[in-house]
Amino acid sequence: MKLIILNDYDQASEWAAKYIRNKILLFRPGPSRYFTLGLPTGSTPLGCYKKLIEYYKNGEISFQYVKTFNMDEYVGLPRDHPESYHSFMWNNFFKHIDIKAENAHILDGNAADLQAECEAFEEKITAAGGIELFVGGIGPDGHIAFNEPGSSLVSRTRVKTLAKDTIMANARFFDGDLSKVPTMALTVGVGTVMDAKEVMILITGAHKAFALYKAIEEGVNHMWTVSAFQQHRQTVFVCDEDATLELRVKTVKYFKGMMHVHNKLVESLPQEPKKN
């Protein structure tokens, strides 16, 4: 497990975006070899998406041969609703890059058979060869995607009832009106994300500090679903200083002492000479 500690949100977002960029470039995707990327929604990844758009516009990276699988979607919210995760992803990321629409996979919260939709999503991930890198964010209660406290740590993509805390937290996106917030969602399971070859969790802000503490300094606990990734073979937590406020000083010093090594992971890669 790696814990990357940056000064602030902007630096954490940039580090994460560079890491994703380098992973895709080193993979060398092509027509018969797609890079598969799991993606989150919410406010935390926005800075990362902005940097990835910047790298695309600068010609540093292409998403032409990238397939994405989003973590979740509300049930019953029209796809074109401004707060649907379809709208979020297209408005904040996909429409600004060269990804093909058929390669951007988002669960359909309006499917006639929601269980069948969830099963089909798992099958699409398998057919794509699994997820190379799954990026996620967490809530203050340590939930990842919509795997609320108490969720099974081996769960798969399914229909999930949202916790009251999550509904209240999301009310800000619905004019503060709790009655407008969907109470159910489709979500990948903890087990779905654990199957990825690599997982990167973005955690920023003092309000996420206790969750980060639970994620890395205490044991695995289904009441803090993010803690499951202690047992993943390749987990990278990326956080800012504020998110470390509940960690032991010794823990912070230990991981900061390795930043000179971890920063090499995001160094610019040498450009390949263009073919004539």
Image (cartoon, rainbow, N blue to C red):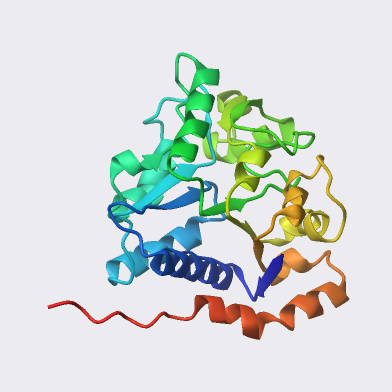
Does residue 238 appear to the left or right of 98 in the view shown?
A: right
Q: Quadrant of the N terminus?
A: bottom right
* Residue 49, position as x, y percentages in the image: 44, 58
* Residue 70, position as x, y percentages in the image: 49, 42
Quadrant of the rendered structure where residue 179 is?
top right
Closer to us: 248 or 30: 30
The residue under the point 55% across, 54% down is 135
The residue under the point 35% across, 49% down is 94
Can you see residue 21?
yes
- Residue 98 lies, with reference to residue 129, above or below; the image says below
Can you see residue 83?
no
Residue reaching furthest to the left: 276
Does residue 259 appear to the left or right of 21 in the view shown?
A: right
- Residue 254 lies, with reference to residue 214, above or below; the image says below
* Residue 229, position as x, y percentages in the image: 72, 52
* Residue 147, position as x, y percentages in the image: 68, 37
Closer to us: 249 or 187: 187
